[in-house]
Image (cartoon, grey):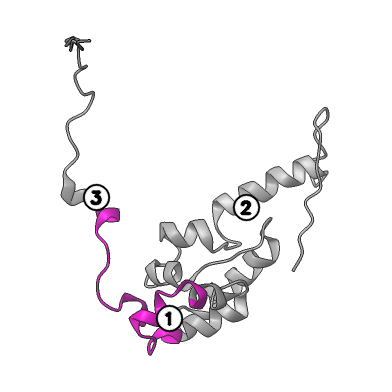
């Protein structure tokens, strides 16, 4: 019994790229931080790398409310920011949980514009937060009246 090997060549036309290649130096998100970057957060200033990178420690020290945020950040942010965050936490449609690792990646010198803060730490003055709240009022029967013809499911928050 003999086996034969058949090679087939397929010709595939590769389309031209729509855009020029991205300059690798602009991909900041791929540049991993090195060194004890978390130690700029006052609450983590004396935490060594082995402890900081431990998932159990991360879970135990996650930020879930404003008092924990204040304890972690201390004097890194203005009192107005914390008041804004307090209202944001109260009115957030979901519970908030921010790991120390993520908290350490936020640029606390400009927290209002930082994209990570905007995604994970709700502020009452954030325009996207207010727009979302306005839409929820419309659905649930707020100032502008309820929308008709849609099913509404109640979300129950437990904390």
The quarter of the image holding the N terminus is top left
Q: Position of residue 108 (x, y in %)?
A: 40, 72
According to the picture, the residue beneath numbered tag 2 turns out to be 130
- The answer to whether one can see residue 127 in this image is yes
Q: Identify the residue position indicated by label 3 in the image.
A: 27
Dot placed on the residue nearer the N-terminal end, 2 or 3: 3
Count of numbered badges drawn on the protein = 3
What residue sits 47% from the left and 81% below the top?
73
Residue appearing at x 27%, y 62% in the figure: 32
Sequence-first disc among 1 and 2:
1
Residue mark closest to the camera, 3 vs 1: 3
Q: Is residue 21 left or right of residue 69?
A: left
Eye-nearest disc, 2 or 3: 3
Residue 33 rendering spot, x and y as whole percentages: 27, 67
Q: Is residue 55 magenta?
A: yes
SS under mark 3: loop
Rendered location of residue 19, percent (x, y): 21, 28
Residue, disc 1? 76
Label 2: few (<14), some (14–19) or many (≥20) C-alpha neighbours in 10 Å: some
Residue 23 versus residue 72 in the image, above or below: above
Q: Gap in Å between the C-alphas at discs 2 and 3?
A: 31 Å
- Hey, which quadrant is residue 34 in on the image? bottom left
How far apart marks 3 and 1 lie (CA) works out to 27 Å
Residue 154 falls left or right of residue 47: right
Contact (Cβ within 8 Å) of mark 1 with mark 2: no
Observer-side mark, 1 or 2, equals 1
State left or right for residue 72 relative to residue 88: left
């Amino acid at each position: 019994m003999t086996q034969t090997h058949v090679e087939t060549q397929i010709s595939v036309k590769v389309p031209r790229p729509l855009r020029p290649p991205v300059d690798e130096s602009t991909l900041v998100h791929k540049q991993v931080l090195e060194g004890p970057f978390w130690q700029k957060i006052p609450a983590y200033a004396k935490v060594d790398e082995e402890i900081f990178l431990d998932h159990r420690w991360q879970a135990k020290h996650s930020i879930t409310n404003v008092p924990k945020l204040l304890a972690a950040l201390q004097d890194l942010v203005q009192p107005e920011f914390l008041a804004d965050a307090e209202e944001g936490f109260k009115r957030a449609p979901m519970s908030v949980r921010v790991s120390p690792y993520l908290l350490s990646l936020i640029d606390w010198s400009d927290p209002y514009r930082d994209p990570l803060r905007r995604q994970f730490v709700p502020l009452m003055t954030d325009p996207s937060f207010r727009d979302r709240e306005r839409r929820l009022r419309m659905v649930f029967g707020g100032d502008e009246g309820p929308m008709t013809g849609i099913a509404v499911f109640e979300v129950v928050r437990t904390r």
